[in-house]
Every structure is written in C-alpha cells, then in structure tokens.
Image: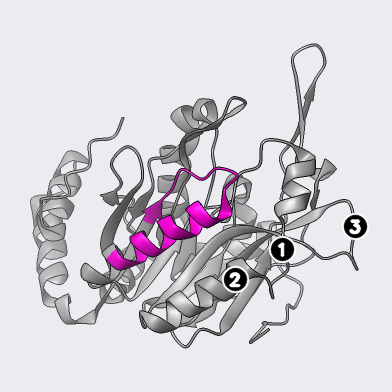
Amino acid sequence: MHLCLQAASRGRRLLGNCLLLGLSRQFANSALKTSMASLKNRGTIAVCQMNCKADKDANLQTCRELITVAKQKGAKMAFFPECFDFVGDNRDKTMELAETLDGHVIKTMKALAKDNDMWLSLGGMHRKDERADSKRLFNSHVVVDNHGDIAAVYDKTHLFDIDIKGHVRLKESDFTIPGSEIAPPIDSPVGKIGLATCYDLRFPEMSIALANQGAQILTYPSAFTATTGAAHWEVLLRSRAIEMQCYIVAAAQTGRHHEKRTSYGHSMVVDPWGCIVACCHEGVDVCVADIDLEYLQKVRTDLPCWNHRRYDLYGKIQTNRSSQITDH
C-alpha cells in the first residue's frame, strides 16, 4: 500500500520525490521554488471515496456529508466515484433502481452543487434511456456546475468484457450500452477537465485524445476490483499522469458492497510529475489537493514531450466531435 504523507507540504513532498528519483538537487530545488511561487494560482479539489450499496437514499446522504466536508476544506470541486448512485446486487435490481438525468438522484446532486457553490463530478450513474435500449443502461459520468446545471455528460466507452472458460465470465456489455464518443474537455474553476471512467484508464489512446484537446486534468472515477486494484491501480494512474503531463483525479469505491463484490478504494490525486499528492484513508473518506496549473505548465516546458512526438511515424489520434450537454 502506498503511504500517503498528507501532513507534508506539497513542495516538500515534491522535493523528496525528485531526490528519490535520482534527479539533481538543483532541479529539485527549482521545482520547490516554482511550487511556492505559484501558491496563488491553485484551485482546491476534493476526492470522495464511497462504499455504496443498493440503498440510494443512504448513498445520497453520504454524498451530502462528503460535500459538507469538502466545503469545509475549501474545495471548489468535488469528485465522486463510479456507481455513486448505487451498487446493485443483481441485474433486475439494477434496472429497477436506474434513473434518467431528470430523476431524483441528479436533481438532488444539482441542488447540493448549487447550495454549496461547488462543482461536482459524478463519476458514473446508472442512466436509463429506453429510447436506446430497454434492457441495458448507460454508465454516465455527469458534471454539474456550481449553479446546479449539467455542464457535461460522458457515457463510458470501454466496457470490461472477460470470458475465461471454466473460470470467470463478466461481460459489462451484457447490461451496459457503450458510449459512442469522447466528450471534449470542459472548462472548470480548477482547470480543463477530460472525462473518463474506470476501465477507460487502461487505454492511453483516450488520455492522449483528451490531452490533445487541451485537458489539464484527467479524471478516472472507478470501482476497481480488489484484485486488479492491488496489482494495477496506482501504476496505471501514475503512468497516465507522467505520459500526459496532467493531473489525475481518481475517486473510487471501497470495501464490500455485497457478497459478490468488493472494491479496492485508494482514491488519489497524482500530479503531472507522477507524484501522489493526496490519498484517502481506508473506508469512506475525503482527501483534498491543490491543482497548480502553473506547475503543470512548468513540467511541460521543462520536459517538452508533446513537442517531441513523431506524428510522421505513428500518426495523430483523432476523435469524433461530441456535443456538450448544457442542461436537462
């Protein structure tokens, strides 16, 4: 388990990580000075870790409590995990509990955003749309602004399908409709955010596409299994941060949801250098971090990987145009 030194200042944490990586003290001190000089150019975010079950009212109450803590900590935006609305224990129950964007869950979260003057990233709701498919749902990442309006909706595109004969069969596509496009990054009080969900983390092409469109923050709300989380969660998040030179925000489900499902947790924020700058404790929790866009730009300037890409050799990833949803 990664030990999160939340009590240390970000500048000292950055210095320590730089030295551990074998970089020169001169570069580390330069990074520390930059971090201190850019204090005024930061936005605080909160990452909320949940242990959702099939009780939507109880889950919404947890959301209220986490938002209250986030506001007390000065957050401009709070990020919630995949399945923040509920985790059902069977397909019929999931279909029964699912709602549209006009339903009680999103109406409640809109009111909370407006009442607390806070942006919310709602990392994956079970969204019903019978016009598309009466037997399957969208897994929708919804962003609500501080006025209580929907700023963006992204439907999860990469679905986890595995069928190992004699061992395990889990096909997300049996009950989830795959999204058809990548949502363009959206402007927010803390920077330009690219939206993704859980299994999307394993596909760097998507993060490249979002970064190419100007994303400064990539968000991966998730419900990783305990097995895959322990093996891959942190290394994947840090890899995306280093490769894209972006902040990575990953709110996660944690603990046992029902007898068949347990999530890994370890919600965290990773900076553009690949350093973990905030991490939740075990159980339901909130951690906070500063998004420092001046520092992000310094990383990209000092290590200009984006200028060194050889598109003449391997092409440039292109994305389909996507319409941004402004209200419902």
- Magenta stretch secondary structure, dominant: helix
Kindly state the secondary structure of the residue where label 2 is placed. Answer: helix
**Residue 286 position within the rendered picture, expressed as x and y whole percent measured from the top left:** 31, 54
Label 3 Cα neighbours within 10 Å, binned few <14 / some 14-19 / many ≥20: few
Instruction: Judge whether residue 147 is colored magenta.
Output: no
Would residue 114 be visible to someone looking at this image? yes
Say which residue appears at 40% left-offset and 64% top-offset: 64
Sequence-earlier tag: 3 or 2: 2
Q: Are marks 1 and 2 in contact (CB under 8 Å)?
A: yes
Task: Measuring from the top left, give residue 77's x and y in whole percent.
Answer: 38, 72
Which region is colored magenta?
48-68
Residue 23 drawn above or below residue 256: below
Q: Which residue is drawn at 76% across and 51% down?
A: 96
Element type where label 3 sits in the image:
loop
Q: How crowded is mark 1: few (under 14 residues within 10 Å), some or many (20 or more)?
A: some
Q: Which amino acid, mark 3?
A: Ser
Number of numbered discs on residues: 3
Is residue 214 visible in the rendered image? The answer is: no
Q: Mark 1 points at which residue?
A: 99
Where is mark 2, residue-wise?
A: 106
Residue 226 x, y percent position in the rendering? 50, 28
Q: Which residue is drawn at 49% across and 67% down?
A: 121
- SS category of the residue bearing label 1: loop
Q: Which three-letter amino acid code belongs to the residue tagged 1?
A: Glu
Q: Which residue lies furthest to the top in this view?
A: 166
Residue holding disc 3: 134
Mark before the other along the chain sequence, 3 or 1: 1
Q: Which of 108 and 215 is in front in this view?
A: 108
Marks 1/2: CA–CA distance: 9 Å
Q: Residue at x 9, y 54 (%)?
A: 12
Seen in the image, is 121 located left or right of residue 2? Answer: right
The picture places residue 223, in percent across and down from the top left corner, at: 54, 43
